[in-house]
Image (spheres, rainbow, N blue to C red):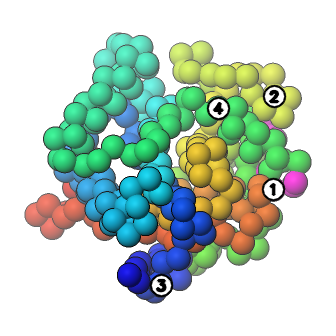
Amino acid sequence: MELKLYDTLTREKRTFAPLDPARVRMYVCGPTVYDFAHIGNARPVIVFDVLYRLLRHVYGKGRVRYVRNITDVDDKINARAAERGIPIRELTEETYRNFKEDVAALGCLPPDVEPRATEHIEEMKTLIERLVAQGHAYVAEEHVLFSVPSMPDYGRLSKRPLDEMIAGARVDVAPYKRDAMDFVLWKPSKDNEPGWPSPCGIATPGRPGWHIECSAMSWKHLGETFDIHGGGIDLVFPHHENEIAQSRCAFHTNVMANFWMHNGFLQVEGEKMSKS
């Protein structure tokens, strides 16, 4: 049976051939657990559940490894926990439990692995230190930042003009940045925020930036290169673009994933469904 998938990176349907037919590997970006999921959040869960079932049908149930992460360290989580006056861990446990119940009610299969960001801090620090040692990242004012100019073909996934990428980046143009496009791999934690011993000899405890977590977790559970990376279309830039930069530069690979797949937004009365 020939399976064809639309690849966001090449903008075309391509015949799918796994790197190892005995171990088909798929990573999908999961929820940030700070609030109830809504029906828009359910769309990627359902879309990639269908793909997971199809891959199991074609290659065999025991030959597909599906990883979907849980983001449990994030600015939104910190803000919501402070707003409710509860510990961060209490908020993430409660929200994660609600998410699992909702997904089960939709009839979706659980992924084979559901890694949490807070349980992969060491892997993130290892990647960060490797990127600094190789000249792809630098330390500035207790932050570690990825140097976008160090990767000549940055932007291949989103195919955005440089000025548009600068304008659309979800980061502050801080004075310690060497380039406006550089993004945070690690940042210092405030007193009321979760923190871990920092990499690269930084004395202040800190926490990871958003993008590094998926590079670390996909590496830990699927390897340096794998078959499919999925998520919502809103993650193409900057999240997936930055994942590619981190992983390819850390491991010196031509690709992070052989196929990039994205589901569209759920439209409600002509607007994107979102928590607001």
Q: Position of residue 99 (x, y in %)?
A: 28, 36
Residue segment shown in magenta: 134-141
Q: Disc 4 and disc 3: Cα gap in Å?
A: 35 Å
Q: Earlier in the sequence, mark 1 or mark 3?
A: 3
Picture disc at residue 136? 1
Q: Which residue is mark 3?
A: 14
Q: Residue drawn 47% across and 84% down?
A: 15
The question of residue 94 being in magenta is answered with no
Mark found first going from the N terminus, 3 or 2: 3
Amino acid type, callout 3: Arg
What is the total number of numbered labels drawn onto the structure image?
4
| Cα gap from disc 1 to disc 3, whole angstroms | 31 Å
> To which residue does mark 2 refer?
202
Q: Are circles 2 and 1 on residues that touch, CB within 8 Å?
A: no
Where 254 falls versus 107 (above or below)?
Answer: below
Amino acid on which disc 1 is placed: His
Mark 4 or 2, closer to the camera: 4
